[in-house]
Amino acid sequence: MHTVRLVLLLTPAALTGCASIVGGANQPVSVETRMSGAPVTGATCKLSNDKGAWFVTTPGSATVHRSAEDLAVRCEKEGQAPGIASAKSSTKGMAFGNILFGGIVGAAVDISSGAAFDYPTLIGVEMGQTGTLARAQAEPQGN
C-alpha cells in the first residue's frame, strides 16, 4: 500500500512539463504560395513571432519556435504583390492535461517555452492578399 501511495504522489511530478517532453518547443511548418489558385514557386517568405524569425523559399519547410503569439508570414517574389498571412497559435490539448497532472509548475514550463502551443502544419499564402489561418486550415481567409 505504501508503494501505491508513493507512485500516486510522484506521478504528477514526473509529468511536469509533459507537453514540452511530448512535442517540444519547436515545430516544423510547410509554406506554399499561390496566385489565383496556381502554385507560385521561388517566393521568399519570412515567418516570425516573439521567439524569432525564420526564412523559407516556397514550396518549403522551416522549423519554428512555438509561441502563444500568432506566426506572421510575409512572402515576396519579384514582379508580384507580397502575400501576407497570420497563422493562429492554438493551445495543444495535452497542455490542459498537464495542468491537471503536472500542476502549475508543469503548465508554466510549457507556456513559457512555447511547448503548450501549436501552429497549422501547412501555411498557404495567396500572393497579393492578406489572410488568417486557423489551426485546422491550410487556406488563408482573405480580408
Image (cartoon, rainbow, N blue to C red):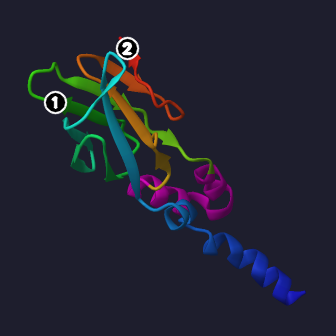
Whether residue 32 is situated above or below residue 65 in the rendered picture: above
> Residue 32 or 100: which is nearer the viewer?
32
Q: Residue furthest bottom?
A: 2
Q: Is residue 116 left or right of residue 41?
A: right
Q: Is residue 138 left or right of residue 58?
A: right
Choose the circle earlier in sequence order: 1 or 2.
1
Q: Amino acid at mark 2?
A: Gly
Residue 73 can be seen, yes or no: yes
Q: Which residue is mark 2?
A: 142
Estimate the x, y position of residue 103 in percent, counting from the top left.
61, 60
Q: Amino acid at mark 1?
A: Glu
Q: Which residue is mark 1?
A: 76
Q: Is residue 55 magenta?
A: no
Residue in view at x 47 percent, y 46 percent:
118
Q: Say which of marks 1 and 2 sits in front.
A: 1
Asked if the residue at tag 2 contacts the one at tag 1, i.e. Cβ–Cβ closer than 8 Å, the answer is no
Give the main secondary structure, helix, strand or loop, of the magenta stretch: helix
